[in-house]
Amino acid sequence: MSIGQTFLGLLEAGPRHGYDLKRAYDDRFGHSRPLPYGQVYATLSRLLKDGMVELDGIEPGGGPERKRYAVTAAGVTDVERWLATAEKPEPYLQNTLYTKVVLALLTGRPAADLLDVQRAEHLRLVRELTRRKLTGDLAEQLICDHALFHLEADLRWLELTAARLDELARRMRS
Amino acid sequence: MTGPPLLVGEDLRKSFGPTPALDGASLDVVGGEVVAIMGPSGSGKSTLLHCLAGIVRPDSGRVLYEGHDMSAMSDSARSALRRTRFGFVFQFGRLVPELTCLENVALPLRMERVRRGEAERRAAEWLDRLEVAGLAGKRPGEISGGQGQRVAVARALVTGPRVVFADEPTGALDSLNGERVMRLLTLTARETGAAVVLVTHEARVAGYSDREVVVRDGRTRDLQRSR
């Protein structure tokens, strides 16, 4: 995710301090991985240098001064461009699972067992995310659904590969 | 989930002609548990469900309901068990087209000689729990697939079954309606303490279960318990 452009989009609602921006980001997009403060201030410094944000005010406090940031017209244009640009679909061609299957077959280990172990782990996560979804708000449900559809795609691949193991083993031997 | 198993299938074997559909499949379910039976098409998962539900008689092996061997029961006793202790949800609701939704849900009670007024009162309660109270007077042809499946779930639960068998209950629905049916099916079954045996090939549907059993070439593998 582009943190810079996400900050710019959040700032469109009005100027904010770095701390408020971090909280808004963590609430909506951080989930179990909040942004480190260092990354928040490094991102804001870069946006300031590039003219995407400007200082809207500085307030003295008990500790360091609190800077308030506002998005510039260039920043709004940047967000618009980013939103309108398609994300590159992930082809997942460097697949560790595929490598493991091939290695298992090459070394005479039971590849079907490997697939079953992976399948059980995927399904465990599917159940966990389903439970989260049932108790979460709409935003949480959408985030969980995104992960669930990807896990489902992996599980289909595991099923298909399990059905083709004999064929794959034959081709590798020939 | 613990407790004595409510339903046990032991070493079930069943062939249709020369083709073995089940080749030593086993599964047990405790009350309140949702178990998903998964596996590729033709792996034997629906045959396993039909054997467990007493719809199909296995060639060998046995099915125990609360410790009683179903194959030792007479046909009428097995039929009565299916009507009073089991509920069924299929891929396509299989509602009776000539009856209203309320009458469809009341039907299993009427077959048990519950008076019409009482049967329809209980049916209306279940339609309400499944969030389709407004469809009571409509016929199946007048409602959507997702609504029909919720009516079918109400019909499966109206008798207070101990086990609900659901064979691809969301197979004909879009994602959103499928999720809604699964949420309501598992929620209401858990509230009533019923076990659910669910056949599905969709991981997101199996996500509503407590445990999955995979059927491959007619044999079962319990992925959680074998780890």
Image: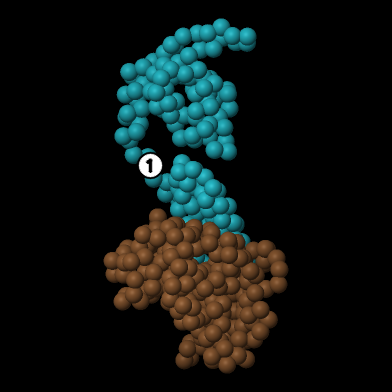
Chain colours: A cyan, B brown
Q: Chain of mark 1?
A: A
Q: Which residue is denoted by mark 1 in the rendering?
A: A88
Residue at 43% across / 17% down in the picture? A15
Name the outermost residue toward the top.
A60
Q: Nearer the viewer, residue A122 or A91?
A: A122
Residue B8 in view of the camera: no
Q: How many marks?
A: 1
- Give the percent coordinates (x, y) of residue A108: 62, 67
Position of residue B109 relative to residue A117, above or below, is below
- Give the percent coordinates (x, y) of residue A5: 41, 27
Q: Looking at the figure, which quarter contains the C terminus of chain B?
A: bottom right
Q: Quadrant of residue A62?
A: top right
The kind of residue tagged 1 is: Lys
Position of residue A92 relative to residue B107, above or below, is above
Q: Name the side, left or right, on which A75 lies relative to A17.
A: left
Badge 1, how many Cα within 10 Å: few under 14, some, many 20+?
A: few
Residue at 43% across / 76% down in the picture? B116
